[in-house]
Each structure stands twice: as C-alpha cells, then as structure tokens.
Image: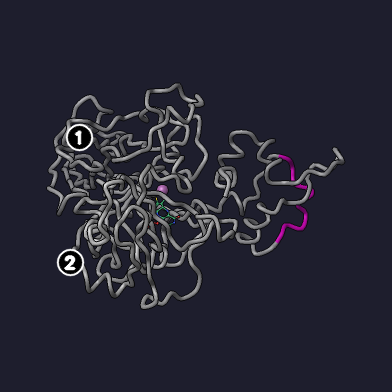
C-alpha cells in the first residue's frame, strides 16, 4: 500500500481538501460536474464502511467528507479488539486509548495491531508449520513448531514492543503513515525459545552480521514475489537473551493477528523487527536489504521540520527511546477539591531500563517523584504510581516524565522532527478538573 492510502481521510482533508478530493474521487473532464466516480481505493473503503454506495454522491460539494467515512475511526471494530481505535482496516491497524493499557501486562484484546500486508488466510495447522534458517550459517535447516519446542530450552518473559511510528500523530508537518497517538505499544508475556540458541544450532559463520526475517503474510498487492515487510537486526540483538521465537502470548497460543503460530520478538526495538507468521530467517553478511529496511530511519543530525533528508544521512532506528504512559485515570476525570487522586501507568526505555518517573500538575514547573517498580525482567515495562493533591479548584493537566538508566528524559514537546514521523517520545498527559 502506498503512503497516500495509509493517510487518514481526516488528515488528507484537513491539509488540502482539493487535493484530498482529487485523490479520492475521479474527476470528470466536464468542469461543471463537481464530482466524478469514486476511485477504486475510495470504493473499497466506502463499501466496507457503508455496505453500499451513496446514491447522490454526484451532488456532494467538493471537500466534503461523507459522514460515514469521517466517522470511520470511531465506528470500526475489529473482532476481539473492541475499544481499540481503528486507523486502517486494510491492512489492519488499531491502537488502544491509553486508559485501556492499564493492565500490568497487556491482554491480547488490548494489544495494538500493526499489519503491513495481508495476513495468511484460513485456518493454519500449527503442526504443519515450518520455518527455515539459511544464509551465513554452516548448517542451514528447517524446523517445525514441534522441533522448536522439543529441541530448545523454553523461556517466558514479559516483553515490551512499540511501533516505531507510535506518536506519529504529534508531528507537524505531518508524516505519511498511520497516525498513531500513544497506544501502539504493549507488554505481554511471551513463551518461546531464544533466537540465539537456534542461531547457534545453525552455527553462524564469521561473516554473519545481520538477520533478515520473513513472514507468511502477503504484500498488499497480492503479489507472492513481494514481501509485505522484511526487516532484521544486527546479529548482536538477535543473540540477546530476551530475543525470542515465541508461540505463546499470555499463556495462550499466539492470536492470529499477532502471528500465529510463530513470531520473533525483538523487544525494545521498533516492533517492525518482530516478525509475525515467521517463515524464514536469512542470516546476512551485510545490513539486510529487505522490504521496508529503508523505512524506520531517522536523520543522523537534527533537521528543520519539513526538510527532505538524503538517504545516506538517515540511520536505522535501533533501541527505542524512553517513554511512559498514564493509564489510570482516563483523561477528562473530574474530582472534588480535597480528594486525593491516585494515578498510575507504565514506563519503558528500549534496551535500557527506567530509573525514575516524575509527575507534574503545574505544566512542568514542579515535579513529584512517583513510586516506580523494577521490571519483571529485562525489556518488561515498569509499573509506577503516585498520589496527587490539588491546591485549588480548576483545570489541571497531569504530566508524566520517565528518565532512563543513562539519565535521558522524555521531552514535553515532540522531539526532533523526522520525515517519517518515528520515535516520538513526548510526555503523555491527562486532563483533570477539580471542583469545589
Ligand atoms: N509478518 C509481519 N510481521 C510484522 C508486521 C507485518 O506486517 N508482517 N508488522 C510489524 C510492525 S511494523 C509492527 S509495529 C509489529 C506489530 O505487532 P502486533 O501487531 O503484534 O502489535 O509487527 C511487526 N511484524
Ligand atoms: Mo510498526
């Protein structure tokens, strides 16, 4: 799918209604007819949303968003993911609002979904599933799920993954792609084996420097020769104790949307390096050059918002930056003056851990230290809580700011603008109204 189609209708219309119109509607050569036929892409969305076409669409004024389409985000529901905000349904992309991420570990119903292509269809027989290891190894082999389970030691860890584009909606000028707000992150418990153990069994050659992962999902075009996405990591990350090939999420087989029957989790890195429906691990003697390896990059130096940056000045994103969420209460809460307010959330920091979490109720002038728990294991997010007291009635914003183990803090404003809108780790905030 092209970037254009992934952009929300709202965004397209807000930026340039005329252009949005032109992209969605096929204009008739006759200048008096304001509206042409819906283009194919528009038709797909329309049919999915309305189940039918709009009889009088020719009469609709230019720049007008059909209400049913405009409300798409609020109305669409993915089965088993009720309450999540659907950013796109082809491919499926949905995120929970922050307050739905309140659980200590993220249940499957509330874990965001990001698909780049068309997931494998129909019922998958896990007993028949195989994946291969090839490339810069002395002993390439294929493994069935059973082989994997019986030949290697099992490990269970709570692991945090976050889409590199989480927070993209905060950038201006806006970047193409899903307009994730805060919810494209989750921390579930995964069971599997260490990818490193499997790579060692295949005997890595000295030339092995990077991995290239392939899943069974199809490219959006349906072309079987094109991968939907194929990313990897330096071998060092693949050999990390918490980089796993997993078959269980929260004690159950992986859900279909999250890669049943097998996926790799590369925790703390852009989740694009955590392939679902795993079919092939290609060990490379160079930086992997698979589909979308050129995406998920940020400029090597700060750039002016809106700048175009040459590819050679863009670096691949590795560990994700320090970040946190306020998951309870939900923004908009009203309380009585004199009552204390308990707040809580999570914090995480890519390959690092979080050393402190502070909250502010006065737009950052003063900070109060929250109670921050240790992670259950490396790469698990950390839970925190604090009790707040408000000095008077009025409208407050509660801000949360995490500091990682290297002393780096979250910014309040969006961090350095980058062309594709990645790694926005600006602080999360909630509104609190205090009344007499
Ligand atoms: N096979 C496959 N793996 C994939 C993707 C995909 O489209 N196909 N999307 C990646 C991206 S960009 C993200 S953010 C995560 C999302 O994982 P989730 O859907 O389990 O939350 O999966 C990654 N793994
Ligand atoms: Mo992603």
| Quarter of the view holding residue 63 | top right
Residue 153 numbered mark, or none: 2
| Element assignment for label 1 | strand
**Residue numbers of the magenta segment:** 53-62
Between residues 333 and 98, which one lies in front from this camera angle? 98
Is 178 above or below relative to 54? Answer: above
Tag in front: 1 or 2: 2
Between residues 366 and 175, which one lies in front from this camera angle? 175
Q: Is residue 189 left or right of residue 286?
A: left
Q: Is residue 156 left or right of residue 296?
A: left
| Quarter of the view holding residue 48 | bottom right
User: What's the coloring here?
Assistant: one colour
* Spatial CA span between label 1 and label 2: 34 Å
Q: Residue at x 35, y 57 (%)?
A: 111
| Quarter of the view holding residue 145 | bottom left
From the image, which quarter does the C terminus lie in? Answer: top left
Q: Residue at x 47, y 36 (%)?
A: 420
Q: Position of residue 105 (x, y in %)?
A: 24, 58
The residue pinned by badge 1 equals 403
Does the magenta-highlighted stretch encompass residue 56? yes
Between residues 398 and 120, which one lies in front from this camera angle? 120
């Amino acid at each position: 799918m092209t970037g254009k189609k992934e952009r929300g209708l709202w965004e397209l219309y807000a930026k340039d209604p005329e252009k949005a119109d032109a992209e969605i509607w096929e204009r008739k050569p006759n200048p008096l007819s304001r509206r042409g036929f819906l283009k194919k892409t528009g038709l797909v969305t329309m049919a999915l949303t309305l189940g039918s076409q709009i009889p009088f669409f020719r009469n609709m004024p230019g720049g007008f968003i059909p209400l049913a389409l405009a409300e798409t985000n609020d109305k669409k529901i993915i089965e088993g993911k009720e309450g999540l905000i659907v950013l796109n349904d082809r491919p499926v992309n949905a995120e929970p609002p922050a307050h739905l991420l309140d659980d200590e570990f993220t249940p499957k119903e509330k874990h965001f979904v990001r698909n780049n292509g068309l997931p494998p269809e129909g019922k998958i027989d896990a007993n028949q599933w195989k994946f291969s290891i090839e490339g810069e190894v002395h002993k390439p082999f294929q493994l069935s799920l059973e082989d994997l389970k019986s030949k290697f030691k099992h490990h269970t860890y709570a692991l945090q993954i976050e889409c590199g584009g989480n927070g993209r909606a905060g950038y201006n000028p806006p970047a193409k792609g899903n307009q994730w707000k805060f919810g494209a992150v989750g921390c579930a418990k995964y069971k599997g084996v260490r990818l490193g153990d499997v790579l060692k069994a295949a005997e890595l050659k000295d030339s092995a420097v990077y991995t290239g992962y392939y899943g069974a999902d199809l490219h959006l075009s349906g072309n079987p020769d094109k991968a939907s996405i194929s990313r990897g990591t330096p071998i060092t990350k693949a050999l990390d104790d918490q980089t796993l090939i997993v078959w269980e999420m929260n004690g159950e087989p992986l859900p279909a949307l999250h890669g049943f029957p097998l996926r790799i989790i590369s925790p703390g890195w852009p989740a694009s390096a955590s392939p679902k429906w795993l079919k092939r691990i290609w060990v490379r003697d160079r930086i992997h050059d698979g589909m979308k390896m050129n995406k998920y990059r940020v400029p090597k130096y700060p750039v002016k918002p809106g700048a175009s940056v040459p590819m050679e000045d863009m670096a691949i994103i590795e560990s994700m930056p320090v970040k946190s969420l306020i998951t309870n209460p939900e923004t908009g809460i009203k309380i009585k003056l004199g009552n204390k307010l308990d707040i809580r959330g999570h914090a995480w920091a890519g390959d690092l851990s979080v050393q402190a979490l502070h909250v502010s109720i006065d737009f950052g002038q003063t900070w109060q230290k929250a109670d921050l728990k240790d992670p259950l294991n490396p790469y698990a997010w950390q839970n925190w809580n604090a009790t707040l007291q408000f000095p008077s009635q009025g409208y407050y914003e509660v801000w949360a700011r995490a500091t990682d183990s290297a002393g780096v803090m979250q910014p309040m404003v969006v961090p350095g603008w980058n062309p594709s809108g990645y790694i926005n780790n600006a602080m999360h905030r909630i509104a609190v109204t205090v009344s007499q």
